[in-house]
Every structure is written in structure tokens, then in C-alpha cells.
Image (spheres, rainbow, N blue to C red):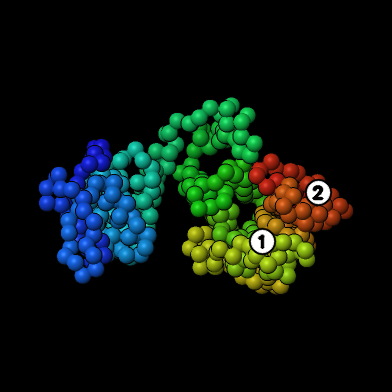
Amino acid sequence: MTEPPATAKIQRWHIGKTPLATETPTAAPVQAPPPGGKPQQRTLTLAQGLVAARDLHRAGRHDEARNVIQAVIRVAPGSADAHSLGASIELAASRPDLALPLAQRAAAIDSPNPDRHRAVGKILRALGRDGEAASAFDQALDLVAARPPTGNPADVNWNNPTHHLQARPVNHVMYRRSKHLDRLLAGWLDPQALTTDDLTRFYFLADNVGHTLTRGVEGALAELGVWRGQSARVLKGMAPGRMLYLFDTFAGFPADQVPEGDSRRDRNLFKDTSLEAVKSFVGTDEVVFIPGVFPDTAKQVPADTRFCFVHIDCDLGAPAKSGLEFFYPRVNKGGLIVMHDYGNDSWPGVAQAVDAFFADKPEGVVLIPDKAGTAVVVKQ
């Protein structure tokens, strides 16, 4: 079904204290009455109704937004946008049971749109119906995978100085496609994350965690510098049955770790996270969360713990050096130490710390051409 024309009229709804209605399809718009005056009637289009409901929703006036969107749906029962907005309003008002049928109706009307099915999955997950949620997410992923590429890669790659179109690994899209990996990738590509344009890093982490385990390297995994948990979720998802240790303040950079004279010292970078938010995103099974300032928190790791894969992503030279000093002797032979931001001159302390540490070690540092220049060593 298609969206109704923009001239479809809303029969009756309310905003605030001023009733808005139509008496006939040709009723002329009038201004709202003066304070204390008698309420008057207006004619509003479908588009205006959606805008009004969305504005009320954003203002936190969910009951008023609900009244508006219900009126919109009565007049435009074939509008996927109206049903989708209605679901968002109910969800924001902590009414997922009422949000679900609206989201499902939007997905039925606009079935080729993966975002509609993804919204259904999120509501089902909020209701604790995890199996049905997984099916909805899988349907969304299938729709995304079936989309033809847009744009000419050559045009984008030649004319854009910072980004390019990139082919995904052929095994992952043709020969060894995995729903599990697709789900991890969906989290990585979340528009709210800052990882959406760094597919190289995603596949590097996913493939090398899996390969390390396939080669039989024993030990736990660890990440120093977690922020919102994007890469931690990949590590956990690719290593079921292994413990994952996550080190972070979960509250941003401590100012005293940023070098003197750095303008970022007092900006409390990466503060837009929390321990509870990361737990919710990553999961808690087989995960040890260690909040605080590293290396002070390292003493919470049992002395006999060994590692197969360590991801150091702390941006600053001092904690990167401390991370290498702590983890290197505890990584088993054949294990990987991955150091993010080695090739990122925004954080020059990382490369300085890595080069100094491995200057007298047998391992050579290998560079990965992802967005921020990851480096990796295989423990000898």
C-alpha cells in the first residue's frame, strides 16, 4: 500500500488545550483562539499531523502525541510512517505492548524497508521475546544484504578524499555467510556508533579472534579502553566460552592522563558512556567488567590468568605503555596483541609507546590499514 496523499485531512485531534478538528474536507484553516477565547477548528494535512505528533513526542508529551497519531492513523490507515511514529511514541512512554502492533503494521505496509523490521525486533526484545526478536532482526539483515549497491564505487573513491566504497570479504558474503556475524555487524554499523565507516577494523577483529581460537591458542580475551563497547561486543561474540576482561573508567578520560598542554586535557573525552550501558550492549555472561584507572585496576586480574587476544584502545601513550607491560608477559604463544590508533597522529603517544616497547622484543609490528591505523603483533 502507498502513502495517502498529503491532502488527506485529520478528522479530530488535540494539541495542548486547543482542540483542532475539521468539519468538512474544505474547511479553511483558522488561527488558534486568543487566551480565554472559544476553541476553533482547523484543517490539517497528513504531513502536518505527522510533524505535530513528532514535535510533541520529542518534547516528551507522549499522551498528547498519542492522541494526534491515533487521529492520523484513523484517516491514513495505510501510512507506514504514522504507524512507525505511533510505535516510537508508545515505546518512549514505556508501553512496548502497545508499540508492537503498530510497528508490525508499519513493517507489513512497508515490508521492503529493513528499518521497519529492525524496529519490530527492538520492541520484541524489550518484551523479552528474544526468539521472535532474532527472527525480525534476521529479516532486516536479509533485506539489507539483498539491496544492490548504490553509486559508482570508482566515482566515490576518486572524488572523496576521506571515504571510499569497499567490498566486503567474499567468504562472508558468498561462501561462509553467518547470521551470527551479520548480527555483530549490525551493531557495528549502528548509526549512533562511530564505527560505521570502519568495516576493515570490524572484519579484522572478527576474523582474527576466530582464527586465533581455531589455531588452538588458549587463554582469555581482554580489552583496555572500551568506551561504548562496540569492539568488545565483537570480541565476545566471536569467542563463546572464553572469558573477556574489560578495563575502562566507563566515565571518560581522567584529566591527569592527558599530557600537559594538550587542549583536550579538560574536555573529559569519551564521557558519553556508562558501565550499565556497556553491560546492556555487550552482555554480562563470561565478561568481567573492571571499572577504574589502569594500571591500578590490573591487580583485580587473578595472577595465573593467561590471554590469547588483547585489544589495547586507550588513545593515550601512558596507559598504552602500561597495557603492554601488563599483558605482554601474560599472552600465550601465538596470541595477538592489537593496538588501535598506532597510525593515528591525533594520538601520537600510542605509536611512541608501542615502538619503544617492542624495540628489544622479537616480534615485529604489522600495520593494518583501518581508519585509525591499527597495529598488531603475534606473540613469539
* Foreground residue among 169 and 307: 169
Pinpoint residue 354: horizontal percent, then vertical percent. Answer: 79, 54
**Residue lying farthest left?**
24
**Which numbered disc, 1 or 2, marks the residue that appears first in the sequence?**
1
* Foreground residue among 82 and 308: 82
Which structural element holds mark 1?
A: strand
Contact, mark 1 vs mark 2 (Cβ under 8 Å): no
Q: Is residue 368 toward the left or the right of residue 68 in the image?
A: right
Which structural element holds mark 2?
A: loop
* Vertical placement of residue 165 versus 184, above or below: above
Pinpoint residue 115: horizontal percent, then vertical percent. Answer: 38, 45
Task: Quadrant for residue 80, please give it.
Answer: top left
Pinpoint residue 52: horizontal percent, then vertical percent. Answer: 30, 55
Residue beneath disc 2: 363
Q: Quadrant of the N terminus?
A: top left
Mark 2 is on which residue type? Glu
Image point (25%, 55%), residue name: 69
Q: Is residue 345 visible?
A: yes
Q: Is residue 57 toward the left or the right of residue 335 in the image?
A: left
Mark 1 is on which residue type? Leu
**Is disc 2 surrounded by few (<14), some (14 to 19) or many (20+) residues within 10 Å?**
few
**Is disc 1 surrounded by few (<14), some (14 to 19) or many (20+) residues within 10 Å?**
many
* Foreground residue among 335 and 6: 6
Image point (71%, 72%), residue name: 296
Pinpoint residue 294: horizontal percent, then vertical percent. Answer: 70, 68
Residue beneath disc 1: 224
Image point (73%, 64%), residue name: 258
In this rendering, the label closer to the viewer, 1 or 2? 1
